[in-house]
Amino acid sequence: MATITETAGAPGMTMEAPPTPLTPVQHREHPQLDEAQFAALVRARWTVSLILTAVMLAIYFGFIMVLAFRRDLLQVAAGGGMTLGIPVGFGIIITASALTGVYVWWANRRYDGAVRRIIATMHTGQTMKGARHG
Amino acid sequence: MASEFSSTIGQPNALSIGFFFLFVAFTLGVTWWAARRSRSAAEFYAAGRSVTGFQNGLALAGDYMSAASFLGIAGLVALKGYDGLIYSIGFLVGWPVMMFLIAEPLRNLGKYTFADVVAYRLRQKPIRVAASCGSLMTVAFYLIAQMVGSGSLVHLMFGLPYEAAVLVVGVVMIAYVLFGGMLATTWVQIIKAVLLLGGASVMVFFVLRHFGFSPAELFRASAARYGDKVLAPGGLVSNPWDALSLGMALMFGTAGLPHILMRFYTVPDAKAARKSVFYATGFISYFYVLTFIIGFGAMTLVGQDVISRFDKGGNMAAPLLAEVTGGTMFLGFIAAVAFATILAVVAGLTLAGATTYAHDLYANVFRRGRSNEDDEVRMAKRATVALGVLAVALGIAFKGQNVAFMVGLAFAIAASANFPALLMSILWKRFSTFGAVCSIGTGATLAVGLIVLSPTVWVDVLHSPWGMAAPFALKNPALISLPAAFAAGWLGSVLRPEPDAEERYAEQKIRNYLGVGAE
């Protein structure tokens, strides 16, 4: 089985045994892992994810509650032959797509770079070990 | 217009049969090409992880946009107006949630199925058995609903006998999956998505041309004929608890559908997985905007009375509109696209079911991880044939039955049995094997048990046995079954902790967030 460090950055094509049972190699601590940086990465990832999830939940369930209790709000004429309900409905559809765009934008701009930096520090300390285990 | 309306719908139509044969011939050609690239397990289950983010986005959309949502939602809009849009929105909002919570961890931690993720640091056997139950139940209910729907739709459109339609769908779908594995399935889904989005776009173009390319004119014409009520929400959401419960099933169920989750393993890495949800959400959003316009187009240009004369549920609204706006030729094309749509969705479901059997049950439970890859692929192929035959048999057995609840049930099981265990295994260090089994068991049992006792099955399917009112008031069980599954997962993990699994959490986190060691 390949070592962890070798597959880093180029995941994908290799065929390996099922992920468990773990080999001692995988069990090994990552002495070079910058714990503080890694913890910050995980925290940032879930802060962004959970905020975006909360926004989506609030919009959708807010819409449902308006439909259930104040349907009349969406029956108001909104000009152009439409009721307010139509732009609101389309707005939710567009917002759902836009939120996925926001996440991709954030992940491409911030997350991926941070991952590369953390992996780079791990590599500098492990090239020797990687060669020995390979 | 309404009284002398005549249509070729329901008669064997040479053009649509021609288009359909063209599609089948072309996709079988793709399958032949894919067959040589579908030998190893990673090729058969995951297309060799060679699919790009954009391609996977299209394939995800093709996997998700069923004939039921194309014909059904267009019909709902045509007959009920605005309420159809509420329905579409429900089926869309699960996608962003899946991206934010599940997509990347799933890709980094798993190999072929979502059970790989749950079993990552827990005990293989109990987890694989439990997760397979959740997976196979979701696939089975979704598949039955699709097969029964396909039989009736093809019968309505081509006048082909129901049984023959189900058989054709079954045979072609088995051919795709058996010989071409995930690679062929992916391309069938991509081709179908392009045809469906293209066909629907052309139909919308035809509709808007009638109204000087002004949607406002279309809405005005609809309101002039059927009253302002078609432009505003009607009675679809009357009970807030029902709406909340169904909303939860749709919101979190999407992130627990095995055939959708499996598609994330076809891309090379987590970045591509994330990108593919972005594209998929965009395509599905666009599709729902199109179906809304198509529905209103059918309402005004075909007429509600004509639509309900062909099918009370409104399923023929889109084909009728195609005929009115583009003639028999366009009808033939749209009918063939609807047929292709059914094929792509059932192929994805069958592949997910076969993978669950071969990878989770056969390789990791029956053979305890000692089988080789060739055995596993051989078992997956056998399971494909068995599932295909079963799907045809069930499709015929459920002919004429009310199966509308099955899609809602599939989403409820996905949201209650699959999603909580998946999320807890990713996020919670102290999640244990016992907790996972409790969570999956509770979610699946409550989802199925409560839906039987709900008005959806108790009243609509069983016709109130012993003259009793439905013992469970909500139409969808997710409001109860989803929180219960989380609670059971927590309780089980607290009662029987697993120090081993806790220890491995640090290593899981590194693979999850950095992609280090991912397949």
Image: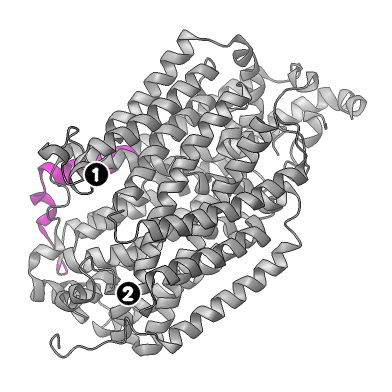
Q: SS for tag 1?
A: helix
Place of residue B402 in the rendered image (x, y in percent of width and height, measured from the top left): 27, 55
Does the magenta run of residues contain B393? no
Residue picked out by circle 2: B156
Please identify the quarter of the rendering in which residue B214 is found.
bottom left
Q: Is residue B259 above or below residue B397?
A: above
Residue at 28% in and 86% down? B324
Residue picked out by circle 1: B457
Q: CA distance from mark 1 to mark 2?
A: 26 Å
Q: Which residue occupies the extreme right position in the image?
A: A132
Residue at 40% in and 61% down? B396
Residue sitting nearer the eye, B471 or A45: B471
Q: Chain of mark 1?
A: B
Residue sitting nearer the eye, B412 or A101: B412
Q: Earlier in the sequence, mark 1 or mark 2?
A: 2
| Residue type, mark 2 in image | Leu
Image position of B470 (left or right of B98): left
Report the span colored magenta. A56-81
Residue at 31% in and 74% down? B318
Image position of B108 (left or right of B86): right
| Residue type, mark 1 in image | Val
Residue B172 seen by the camera? yes
Place of residue A58 in the rendered image (x, y in percent of width and height, measured from the top left): 29, 37
Residue A110 seen by the camera? no
Which image quarter is the N terminus of chain B in?
bottom left
Sort mark 1 into few (<14), some (14-19) or many (20+) by Cα contacts within 10 Å. Answer: many
Which image quarter is the C terminus of chain B in?
top right
